[in-house]
Structures are given as structure tokens and as C-alpha cells.
Amino acid sequence: MALLVLSGQPCSGKSIVAAALKQLLTAKGLEVVIIDEPSLSLKRNHSYKDSVSEKNTRGSLKSAVERAVSKRHFVILDSLNNIKGYRYELWCIARAAGTRCCVVHCKVPKETAWAWNKGRAPDEDAYSSAVFEDLWCRYEEPDARQRWDAPLFRLAPDEGVDSMAPVLQGVVQSLTEVAGPQQQSVVAKQLQPTQATSNAPLSATNLLHEIDAGAQDVIGRISAAQELAGSIGTGRMDMGEGVDALQLDRPVTLAELRRHKRVFLKMSTQNLASRLPDRQSARRMFVNYLREHLT
């Protein structure tokens, strides 16, 4: 149904917000999935200790989001999401799935975040001072003017859940309500898949090979028929099941047939790919091409 991206510096209260939003959404009878580092058995301090570890962590989180996002349930990504390019990739995932997407920015003073980090229990994987400082300095704050960061909601978790209640309700309404002409609250748009975000059809995986094989089969039939006919003339030739016969009133050399095949391959892969899902269709279209250009 929707992807909700939490963004904030380390120890800024994102997990508190995620739990509160899950409670509100569950109360509406909706299925909610929270994805974070612990759910993937990742230790936060270890996951962000260097650029390689951070890249692998982001990749694991994004893969989990891709698997979970659907029109059946809500996905809350509880992580730093501190790079605007990464938030754009998440937005593209939501668009490819045809769901809604919004960003919630959690912001607290640096002193508060460090105090919360130091107050974590030993088994909660607190950040080291070096990792904490590095992540804090590199954070790229969401901007509502960017389509992948909109709609954008801002929260201050250090002020308590009660003070956040109106904004949390706004987030839920944004993801569950339908926008109307007199809509007062911000409603996230239902994203629509595009060619850039949609997976290519399976028929295009081996498209060039299938078209080439189909065209070569036609050339083989023409060459064989001309050899049998000799100097008499080719005339009408059978092109196989599902393909109309081809009438040739003059001999055609193999070099000429190969030249036509190269042109046909170029045209097919550029303009006619959606019309050539298999080898049989390629044979039929190549015969039609030859019928037009050789007669």
C-alpha cells in the first residue's frame, strides 16, 4: 500500500516514531512491516564503520524493501536514510510497485542524540564516538521541494509521543486517505510505474537472438527453394506453419538476403520489439518485409 521512509541522524528517535506509526496503522486493521538493521541481523555500529560496510548495509536494506513493498501492506524503513540519492532509489522502488511514498524526518539536538546513544544497553549496539560523529556530519536533510522527499513530515521525538500525535496522524492520513477537491491535509500521491522503473518483459531477454534465428530460417528456406528451382525461377515458396507463402519472381542472391536481414534486425530491435515476442513472429514479420522490398 505504501512505503514510509524514516530519515534522521543516528539516535534521533526514529525507532520510537516507527513503533508509534505501526500502532496507529495496525489500529486501522492494516498490515505493517518494519525494516531496520536489527531485523536483518545487522549491528548498526559495525554496519556504518566504513564506506564499504555502509554501502553493503544500504544494499541489504534496499533489497529487503524491494521484497516487502506491495499493494497489500505498509512498509516502514527505520534507518538513517541519510543520502538524498539513496532516498531517490527508495522512491523509485515505490513507484515501480505503484504504491504511495512519504518521508518522515526525525530531528533532535546533537547533545540529546549522543545522550540517548550512551544510554543504550550493551545489547543495543551503541555507536562509537567516531562513527556517530561521521554519520552526523554527513547527513543530507530531506527537502520537500524534491519529489522523492515529498510529502515530508518533520518530528521532534525528544518532545514526547503526545506532542508528536498531530503529525503522526497526518502521516497516517497522508498514506491512507484519498485526495479530494477540498482536501485540507497533505495526501501522498499514488505513484505510477514508468518504463524506467518497470522490469523489462521476459520476452525481451533473448529478443535479438530470436529475431536473428527467425530471419535466418526464412533465408535458409529461400536458398533451398532457389537451389531446387534452378534456372526455372523460384515462384511461390512455403515459409512454414503459421507464415504465409512468399512469391518471388526473380532470383535473389544470398548477399542481398543478408543485407535485408541486417536492416530488418536494426528496425526490429529499435521499433518493433513489442510486436516480436517470439521466433515465429520474427519469421512472419521478416517474410512480410521481404514481400514488400523484393516484389
Image (cartoon, grey):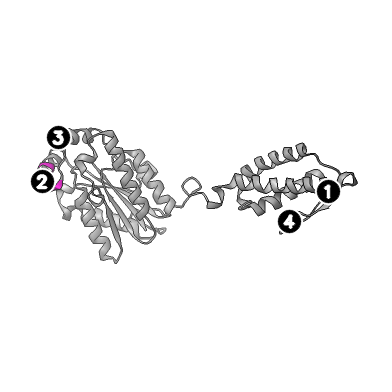
Disc 4 to disc 1, how far (Cα)?
Answer: 17 Å
Judged by its main secondary structure, the magenta piece is helix
Disc 4 to disc 2, how far (Cα)?
Answer: 74 Å
Task: Provide the residue designation for mark 3.
Answer: 129
Dot 3 or dot 2: first in sequence order is 2
Task: Provide the residue designation for mark 4.
Answer: 240
Q: Nearer the viewer, mark 4 or mark 3?
A: 4
Tell me where residue 172 sits by quadrant: bottom left
Dot 4 or dot 1: first in sequence order is 1
- Please indicate, yes or no, whether residue 295 appears anywhere in the rendered image: no
Task: Provide the residue designation for mark 2.
Answer: 122
Quick one: quadrant of the N terminus? bottom left
Q: Nearer the viewer, mark 3 or mark 1?
A: 1
The front one of 162 and 196 is 196
The front one of 248 and 79 is 248
What is the magenta range? 116-124
